[in-house]
Image (tube, grey):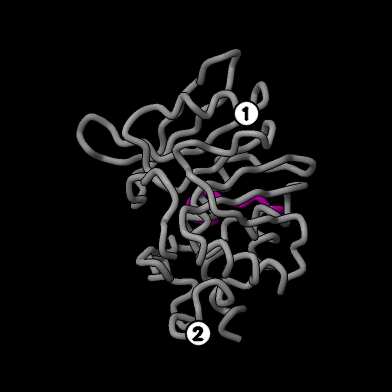
Amino acid sequence: MLEKEGFAALVLRLRSEGVADTRLLTAMEQTPRTLFVGPSHGDHAYDDRLLPIDCGGFAESADMVARVLNLAKLDKGQRVLDVGTGSGFLAGVAGRIAERVLTIDRYKTLTHLAQQRFAHLGLTNVVARQGDGLVGVPGEGTFDRIVVTAAFDSLPRQYVDFLVTDGILIAPIKDKDGVTRLSRLTKVGSRFEREDFFEVPYLPLIGGLAAAI
């Protein structure tokens, strides 16, 4: 009942913002949010607020996940890279739409927990792996979509080579005033065409792998 009521409230909020992609909303409904936030926060799983997760991080709201993925224009047959696994919810939802999702995080604990959740839901096309978001995933080929949920200080040009032509990178980028906004970067040739959208709460991207967890 909690899941059903929470999702219904979420859909009403999203539609009021113009997010009405049936395929995206169905994917979210099929991916129980309570599974990704832990039992102590289950009552707030669908609230439009940040929730704490392991390793000192936070899970963005389901509202934010929907807004981010809506901008990404996910479609069947796509390969998606998710940088910043967190709870794994975003990657799980993306996996309901795309052909394959690879999600990386600097914390091994987070990728391990996320992989357990994907297995529980039967999402065999979603793989979580420890990785360095500043470096990306050398050797994995190119992706149709890349979603980054940690902020860059400048345009992340290093990701151009990981995208197919006309591929889309969704990334938070901090502007000269210190405000972090979500940007949609479309690959055209060897450069990006940039569109800036709304302010987001994502923290700066930290390079390297976490040694302890």
Residue 145, position as x, y percentages in the image:
63, 37
Q: Is residue 15 visible?
A: yes
Cα separation, mark 2 vs mark 1, equals 37 Å
Tell me if label 2 and label 1 are in contact, CB under 8 Å. no
Residue at the spot of label 1: 163
Residue 64, position as x, y percentages in the image:
46, 55
Which label was assigned to residue 4?
none
How many C-alpha atoms fall within 10 Å of the one at disc 2: few (<14), some, or many (≥20)? few
The residue at 31%/34% (across/down) is 153
What amino acid is at disc 2? Answer: Pro
What amino acid is at disc 1? Answer: Leu
Q: Quadrant of the N terminus?
A: bottom right
Q: Is residue 12 visible?
A: no
Sequence-first tag of 2 and 1:
2
The residue at 53%/56% (across/down) is 85
The residue at 56%/61% (across/down) is 111
Asked which secondary structure carries label 2, the reply is helix
> Magenta span has 14?
yes
Query: Which residue is most to the left?
Result: 177
Residue at the spot of label 2: 39
Residue 76, compared with residue 4, is above or below; it is above
Of residues 142 and 18, the one nearer the viewer is: 142
> Magenta span has 156?
no
Residue 170, position as x, y percentages in the image:
51, 38
Of residues 72 and 21, the one nearer the viewer is: 72
In screen coordinates, is 84 left or right of 74? left
Q: Quadrant of the C terminus?
A: bottom left
Residue range highlighted in magenta: 12-23
